[in-house]
Image (spheres, rainbow, N blue to C red):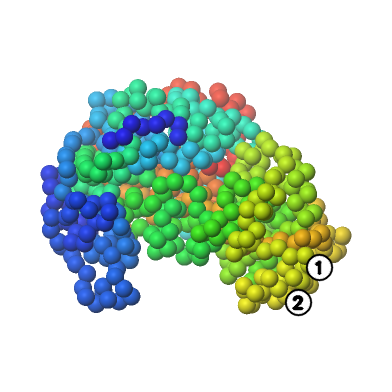
Amino acid sequence: MGEHTKNLDRRTFLKGGIVAGAAAAAGSMLAACAPQASVATATPSSADEGGARGASDATGVGAGYANPDGVGIPVTPSTTEDADVVVIGSGMGGFTAAMLTKEQDPDAHVIMLEKQSTLGGNTNFAEGGAGFLNMSPEEARAAVQADMIQRNFVVDASLFYALRTQQGDCSDWLFGKHGVPLKDYGSGQPLYEGGSGASAIAALTPQAEALGVDIRTESRAFALVMEDDYQVTGVQYKTADGNVVQLNAKAVVVASGGMNTNPELLKLYSNVDLGKVMPLGIGQDGDGHLMVEQTAHGRTGLQTIDGFFAGIGTADDPCGFNSDLNTAAGFQFSSVFVNQYGNRFYDESFGFNTGSQLFFTCIPQVVLSQRQAFALFDESYIQKWEAGQWQNGHNGFDSATKQGTPLEVRAEIEKVQNRDWFYQADTIEELGRALAADVESFDVEGFIKTIEAYNAASEGAEDEYGKPQEFIWALKTPPFYAAKAGVNAYNTNGGIHINTHAQVVDPNGKAIAGLYASGIATAGWDSQVYGGGTNQPVALWCSCAAARHLVEHRLGKTVADDWMGDVPMTSILGESYANANPLG
């Protein structure tokens, strides 16, 4: 256990020991703790087909994944403890589940596990912004219809309806009862104070400690303890000093985030070119997904890439999300992109909107639709950026509070000028030839015509792609630049199927007793395009639902009618406040 730092196929396993484990070695995490018995081993043909397949093929967890840390594979523990509830993760979902459970059952032993040395996970980087008021059934039906339309009807309407009708109670609990600071910066929705969830974690940490939540950092949960496929009775985690601790519990809440920082696993659960996906955040390794696959839930689902505008660079060598150059070249309405043929390739009239779909979440998927994409700019662009002429910061907070601030890009150009994904030339033709040297399909003559037409549009000619003239900045001033474009991926979204109590369910909807999931690890919220409002608001709602259900059905207590407190959001935001499209 570490001292936490503020601000920042299926397996069976008996409560007291292993009934069935995995034959494959569990890797570096579990090197000293091998499973006791084998119930499934890879056949020679499966091992030989395409090379070694790894531990997960033998266990039914993360099939095809090497699983170097043995996630989802229980072992003989070093020590065993009893608890009532274990929450995996210390982001918004983790804190909410742990604190609300403890409030409603003060005698319960609630343990919150965080594998990092600091608390908060990726909530530290989130802006927040939610639906802060409960909707009436009529309002919720209309809102859910819009949610369904903008997400191509592949999401779970029952989850959205529950969220929309209960989101105000959840917000009252977080911002009213617990005083998480909230401020309207003019971005369309009030945000966490300072524009990041670090302020929320700072506010919640001492309150969780005061409630008696047992917070353990540097404690990586890696396997569920199970009575059978439909009954979870605890979790195993590894401490900083390498010991494996088994926590027997009446309920486990998985709030461990997505797969964003584990590309080897994500490639098995995604259908996009991950070479163009530049992940953000920390610790989103898919641990929760693999653990859930131990149960009757089975394989977790497709991971949506929650992208925000375009970024420059590659997955292995990104320019960097906080880079002014990345923001300047990829985030602007004035940005211009060409594809592997040297052509512009999408409607730039900003007519993407269906329902309340946001332009900046469509662009990543538009970029991913092409085999290659390049952001273009020239010296005149740099001069405008240096003069503070830009439309979008790298998040809503910056867009609202830093307009007119100069972007410092020249020093960053010097840093990246020799990268394989960055190009510079004295003429448009030379730039095209440099790109064609790397991309055989690139048509230099066609590219020259594309830029000539773009420059004509900057002077008033009709633009074939419908871009408003104010955002058509001519490309006439050398030197000229191009950078490979990809996606700034905030996180992934989806995988674990839940019901409206946030219980994990099997393919027929039957609940796995004692197992709940929260936040971006859960399925049913997004299609291929990130719709907005499916990160922090979903984590908050899921964990409120999970805590209330487990208190009554796993701990045998009664949830108070006023669990959300007595400080309504209208007293914070004003009586005239109306819900807007969530941002978080």
**As rendered, which of 514 and 418 lies closer to the eye?**
418
**Badge 2 density bin: few <14, some 14–19, many ≥20, Cα 10 Å:** few
Query: Residue 530, how many percent across, how many down?
Result: 53, 53
Q: Which residue is mark 1?
A: 453
Query: Residue 418 versus residue 474: which sits nearer the camera?
Result: 418
Task: Name the side, left or right, on which 553 lies relative to 442.
Answer: left
Q: How many marks?
A: 2
Considering only vertical position in the picture, is 511 above or below 478? above
Quadrant into which the N terminus falls: top left
Looking at the image, residue 278 sits to the left or right of residue 338; the answer is left
Whether residue 194 appears in this view of the structure is yes
Badge 2 is on which residue? Answer: 445
**Image side of residue 518 versus residue 531, left or right:** left
Q: For residue 446, which quarter of the picture? A: bottom right
Label whose residue precedes the other's in the sequence (1 or 2): 2
Q: Secondary structure at mark 2?
A: helix
Q: Amino acid at mark 1?
A: Ala
Tag 2: amino acid:
Glu
Residue 481: horizontal and vertical position, in percent?
71, 61
Q: Position of residue 508 (x, y in %)?
A: 30, 58
Q: Is residue 295 visible?
A: no
Q: What residue is shown at x 51% (from left), y 40% (from top)?
A: 125
